[in-house]
Amino acid sequence: MSPQQTATDDRTGTGGGIGRIVAASLIGTTIEWYDFFLYGSAAALVFNTLFFPSSDPLVGTLLAFLTYAVGFAARPLGGVVFGHFGDKVGRKKLLVLSLLMMGGATFAMGLLPTHAGIGVWAPVLLTVLRLVQGFALGGEWGGAVLLVSEHGGDRHRGFWASWPQAGAPGGNLLATGVLALLAAVQSDEAFLAWGWRVPFLLSGVLVVIGLWIRISVTESPVFLQAREQREKAAAQAARAAGGAAEAARAAAESVKEEAPAVDVLRRSWRAVLTAIGTRLGENISYYILSAFLLVYVTTHLGLPKSEALNAVLIGSAVHFVTIPLWGALSDRIGRRPVTLIGALGTTGWAFAFFALLDTESFPVIVLAVTVGLLLHGAMYGPQAAFISEMFDTKVRYSGASMGSQLASIVGGALAPIIAVELLKEYDSSVPISIYLACGTALTAITVLLARETAGRDLAHDSATTGVPPATGAPHATDVPPATDVPPAPLPTGRTEIYAPHRDSPQ
């Protein structure tokens, strides 16, 4: 079956239409990020006093963010485990499991007694549940973006794969919106007493909705095709061996492969490093623009938490809408140029951001957050397609998950902690701006050194053809778009990315 036929059949299947696939991935990732970001917001606003009481507000916040970071520490492990089984048994089953784990842990957080009730066991249990959250999210991202990337055609992959990315601001929008609503209708005393539990318990309802949608979609056609090819190779090897014992031994040897995590580190370690570098600045910037912002505005500037929450709410709405637009642009001009726009733009905005916050004007704070998240979206929108296109099918789940989740430890996990420490040490935002600018500059350098991947045929594996992933695929224009995909013709003068391979008719 040709890649073009696969893409067409996929779009017309009963459970595999690209719209349904995108909806299932978007809703699932939105719920998972809602759960994950809910903790980050609560760490800045609630957990610092209810679970980590301290005479110094910044110390309590720092301890709350340390457990926040624990969730990131579990993400690479989740990426390895989910990636292993996702590359072996398929993407869909693992996505259902990740949603159940994340939703169950978040719901349980809403039932936890606080430090006043059970003492030290309160933060211990909170930390354990945070580990479960991180483990589940480590497997969610890779599976969600791959399910869309491997269903969609080569020509518009950046656009389609960016929708699961929009689940991050979607989840943040939902989490921040619920918290902002509760903060607006409740007194601080009522919010601290019981109101904060409502968003966590709401996760149970959201998970039921997400599971209903996610179970209805089909498995990735690219994964099924690759598995079928491996099974045929095993059968041919068995027949060639002859004899029952020899055939069984040959079949066993033919299907015996390295664990995907080992294989990806041995064969594609450069791609893993590229994925880490691509995500590093994006991760740092996002968690400073969203999670640390709440600390800076409420603790350092002394403004009401409603102003900080509303600023993130407005910025996340713009972020949600523009991420697919950045993804679509990457289909036209390439993944690298769009990512560079975001990385270099955020490097400069890092210094303007805190200067605008220091004005203590709500409209100006909204402007600071919105522009920051808009630039972040230029890095984040093309990222799903960019990283997916770096790896072959049999290790794609493992490779994408490992690269992205290892970056989350160095970037997302440490960013709020480092920012809080810098603020405590210097009582100034300048060191934080320098830290943020260094992170995004490293991403810019990584992307400048990386190969362009836009238009790669994901069914084309270097393991079977001997051609590296970044150079062996047909160009995007070689595969006509399906009829239900919105047309997005490439500019007339676009440079051919895969110039050495022009076997397909133009």
Image (spheres, rainbow, N blue to C red):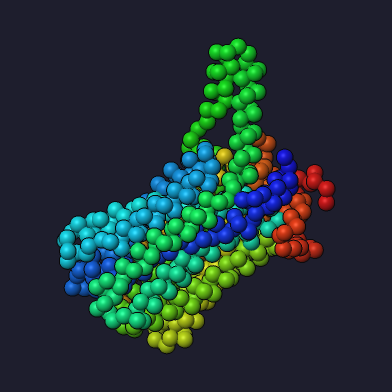
Q: Position of residue 203 (x, y in %)?
A: 39, 62
Q: Which residue is pictured at 48% across the width and 40% down the height? A: 85
Return the residue nearer the eye: 362 or 56.
Answer: 362
Q: Is residue 154 above or below residue 239?
A: below
Q: Position of residue 53 (x, y in %)?
A: 20, 68
Q: Quadrant of the N terminus?
A: top right
Q: Which residue is pictured at 61% across the width and 30% down the height? A: 231
Return the residue nearer the eye: 135 or 417.
Answer: 135
Residue extending farthest to the right is: 505
Is 122 on the left or on the right of 71, as rendered? left
Number of marks in picture: 0
Return the residue nearer the eye: 92 or 409.
Answer: 92
Q: Which residue is pictured at 35% across the width and 64% down the height? A: 200
Q: Position of residue 394 (x, y in %)?
A: 57, 39
Asked whether the viewer can see residue 187, the reply is yes
Q: Position of residue 259 (x, y in %)?
A: 48, 35
Q: Is residue 110 above or below residue 224?
A: below
